[in-house]
Image (tube, coloured by chain):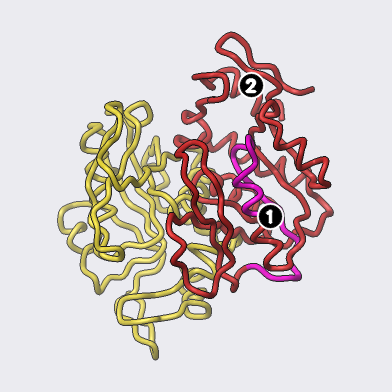
Chain colours: A red, B yellow
Amino acid sequence: MKQMEEMILREGQVLSDDILKVGSFLNQNIDTDLLYATGNEIARLYEGCEITKILTIEASGIAIAAAAGMAMGVPVLFAKKHRTSNVDGNTYTASVHSFTHNEDYNVIVSRDYLHSDDKVLLVDDFLANGHALRGLIALCDQAGAEVTGVAIAIEKCFAGAGDKLRAEGVRIESLAAIESMSREKIVFRS
Amino acid sequence: MKQMEEMILREGQVLSDDILKVGSFLNQNIDTDLLYATGNEIARLYEGCEITKILTIEASGIAIAAAAGMAMGVPVLFAKKHRTSNVDGNTYTASVHSFTHNEDYNVIVSRDYLHSDDKVLLVDDFLANGHALRGLIALCDQAGAEVTGVAIAIEKCFAGAGDKLRAEGVRIESLAAIESMSREKIVFRS
């Protein structure tokens, strides 16, 4: 999506080889014009796919998922993160490793809100190593729900997880796909 | 807002004298028709107030703030929760006590995104004891920003904090204001 790429070039800050700061418009301060366009673009990409539910993960995926859900007219479910494994029995749970904090955490959703007849669109702000996304896929597998596809605001293609998941048959649509980045230059996949 | 009250009556579960479960439509699984209407209603209530920024708190305030932000055409900033006080120097920080988890946590926003010329609308899903809301007000005070008002999806009026804040001069608009509730009956403020 042109608008996302332009915003990254204008506002994004490459802090290191693999850290892109987008807090000014995407994941702390949210530009709502861009958010609205993002929701509409995700709806366009998955038009006709009969999505019944969007699943995301707290916290920075929620706004994007909400915008897409309103554009598509489907409910949005967000998985919660817990550090402990002490969760009640009425949940689906998957373990995710966080490189950022170098610890494992659980992603959790209530069984009440994810069902075997759901066709699920997974939404998140970033896709890099794919750990969070694999956690969400595991939750859908436990529920017997179909993962129809994935929509990501910014994919770090150089981290490799997106292409690996595509090779496994997962449909992934990234609104901005970064092939390489440095302080001097950001190159998008064409 | 009629639609919010009706949804509470149809889907809400009163688990105890002060716990109302709304996970099926508001704070875990999100009904996006209701969310869209909620955003529009908040925009209507604060029309002409020249709001420059919406401030909310992760995680369950984000979707409502995003809907309102898109309806109003203003950016949305969300404060993060941290258990520790080890935060970098470029932040505004306030301590909040959580009754649910019986612990204190910090709410934090970057100084980059909240300024002295901002006219801020605070948004959250629930208002009960008001601790989270006072934390957000403290962040605005630190930034020298004006708190123009507050929009809440569901206020538990019986908890008292909303009326106390109103008496202090804070404008609070609640889309559903619960005067009293029990397993048998929910009474809204008229």
x and y, in percent, of residue A113 in the image: 61, 69
Q: Residue furthest left?
A: B168
Find residue A137 and name its label: 1
Circles 2 and 1 on the same chain: yes
Up/down of A137 relative to B148, above or below = below
| Kind of residue at disc 2 | Glu
| Kind of residue at disc 1 | Ile
Up/down of B91 relative to B2, above or below = above
x and y, in percent, of residue B20 in the image: 39, 75
Q: Is residue B190 visible?
A: no
Q: Residue at (52%, 19%) from the top-left corner?
A: A16
Q: Is residue A131 visible?
A: yes
Give the chain letter at badge 1.
Answer: A
Q: Which residues are magenta?
A: A114-137
* Quadrant showing the N terminus of chain B: bottom left
Mark 1, secondary structure of its residue:
helix
